[in-house]
Amino acid sequence: MEIKRPLLLISNDDGYQAKGINDLVEMLSGMGDIIVCAPEEARSGYSCAFSATTPLRLNCREKRQGVEIWSCNGTPVDCVKLALAEIVPRKPDMVIGGINHGDNGSVNTHYSGTMGVTFEGCMKYIPSVAFSLCDHRDDADFQPLRSLICQITELVLREGLPLGVCLNVNFPLILGDPRTTYKGVRVCRMAHGTWYNEVTKCHHPRGYDYWWMVGQYQNDEPEAEDTDNWALAHGYVAITPTQIDVTAYQAMDQIKSWDL
């Protein structure tokens, strides 16, 4: 009986042409059959948004042995939904988001289109992982991530993940001596952090005001060594198990005590 290779569905929020997703395909091509369905262009910050009122289009960009690459004019979540409905020949063994150009730690988890990919896979009961590198450059070097990405992918394929749990994996940026490696891997919680000064107002020469969404991120607990922000700042790879169920169980008794 023929043994089927694992089927990996990959998407991102940087677009199908981004270096991160193409390097990821190259890294994992020996581990299974790969189907990529990613946005036509960058869709950073789209989180779990999907297109309820916009018609969607799919384009097959490339087919080769073991790899198919598709693009969609929609959001990262649109890409996963369309791929599952129209492209994949069977239920994927994993959904993978990334490799993202930039940090998706702390509250960025909630904004990230890369995490949107991973949440969508998880909500479809498929083991799902997001990979991100703390480097926004278009030509970021993803090769130092290869070994750990392959190890984590292999472990998730073999061991699975708890129901409703996906992994948010962030790699720190290591510069300088190419022999420098990560200090290790830490399983972390999300840091409490906030974006400040997020809106910049400008005045257009034609007489109207407009705004840019910008801002600076601040880790609001920089000394907490059990967080993803601390791990990344100190040269560790941060793995944050992230769950779909956002119920605040610890607050339920307090709310039940209200006289309602």
Image (spheres, rainbow, N blue to C red):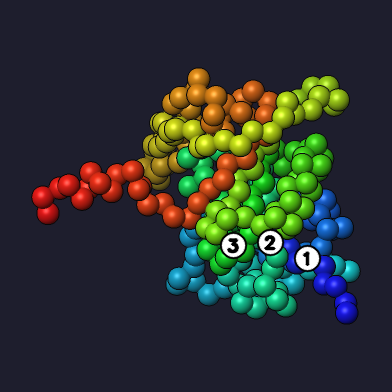
x 50%, y 37%: residue:
190
Residue 258 placement (x, y as % from top left): 15, 47
Q: Work out whether mark 2 precedes mark 3 in sequence or the reverse, and give the earlier one.
A: 2
Q: CA distance from mark 2 to mark 3?
A: 8 Å
x 88%, y 79%: residue:
1
Residue 107 placement (x, y as % from top left): 47, 40
Q: Is residue 135 visible?
A: no
Q: Secondary structure at mark 3?
A: helix
Among the 4 quarters of the image, the one containing residue 53: bottom left
Say which residue label 2 marks. Answer: 94
Q: Is residue 123 visible?
A: yes
Q: Is residue 31 left or right of residue 203?
A: right
Please tell me how crowded label 2 is: few (under 14), some (14-19), or many (20+) other residues with Cα within 10 Å: many
Q: Secondary structure at mark 1?
A: loop
Kindly identify which numbered label has been placed on residue 6.
1
Q: Quadrant of the C terminus?
A: bottom left
x 53%, y 48%: residue:
242
Foreground residue, 84 or 183?
A: 183
Q: Nearer the viewer, mark 1 or mark 3?
A: 1
Name the residue type under label 3: Gly
Q: Is residue 149 left or right of residue 216?
A: right
Say which residue label 3 marks. Answer: 121
Q: Work out whether mark 1 precedes mark 3 in sequence or the reverse, and give the earlier one.
A: 1
